[in-house]
Amino acid sequence: MKQNGMRLTLMNSAIKVVANAGLDKTTTKAIATDANLNEVYIYRTFEDKDDLLMSTFNSLDDELRSCILTNLLDMEQREIKGEESCWMFLENIWEHILSDYDKCIYFIRFYYSRFLDSYANSVRKKKYSEVIEKMQPAFIEGTDVWTTLNYILGVMFSFAIKIIRGEDSEGNLTAEYVFRLIYAALQPQMSWTQKKSA
């Protein structure tokens, strides 16, 4: 197996193991077993377990960032603005988050763990700079768009985990419900709502 293929295999196994067992109970042995590889290959491909877990999170975060950016660019090209653009943006991100339960659980467990320290957060903010730049015009001057984006994602992930755990037996946690909740909180900071009231 080539290096890139082995890296991807180990990262996919890390996602499954962490999603099922949690970060604290995840071992290199469990990851290697899931990948049908000898444990030694983890250390040939990554520095250690922490490097494997961080690399896996970074890969998932890159997927999320790419999804967000693609949606923002698409709306920009189609000149969709206002509440409609907000709805499209949130609906597409919601669908991305729920497209793979194991990835969603991994992301949440890692995001709220000791691994994502202030350094990692500052690196993420830098990686998201184009996203922040594209989102900025939707908000009034002085809005901390990075904090706002993390609020949006935090709300989405908190409801997504309820769906994954089966806590939404009546099917109330729809994309529209999540949108209305987020939109109500963000509306005072939206640039177009300020223009309407002027």
Image (cartoon, rainbow, N blue to C red):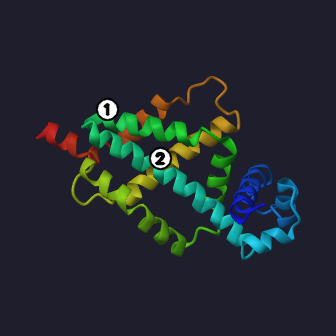
Q: Residue at x 39, y 34 (%)?
A: 88
Which of discs 2 and 1 lies nearer the camera? The answer is 2
Would residue 22 be found to the left or right of residue 88 on screen? right
Q: Considering the numbered disc 1 on the image, is that residue within a helix, a strand or a loop? A: helix
Q: Quadrant of residue 24?
A: bottom right
* Tag 1 residue: 84
Mark 1: few/some/many CA within 10 Å (<14, 14-19, 20+): few
| Vertical comparison of 50 with 26: above or below | below
Q: Position of residue 148 (x, y in %)?
A: 39, 54
Residue 120 is situated, as x and y percent measured from the top left of the image, at: 54, 71
User: Which picture quadrant has residue 163?
Assistant: top right
Residue drawn at (28%, 54%), measured in percent from left and top?
136
Of the residues under marks 2 and 1, which one precedes in the sequence?
2
Q: Residue furthest top?
A: 170
Identify the mark at residue 192; answer none if there is no mark: none
Measured from the top left, where is residue 129 in percent x and y? 37, 63
Give the residue at mark 2: 67
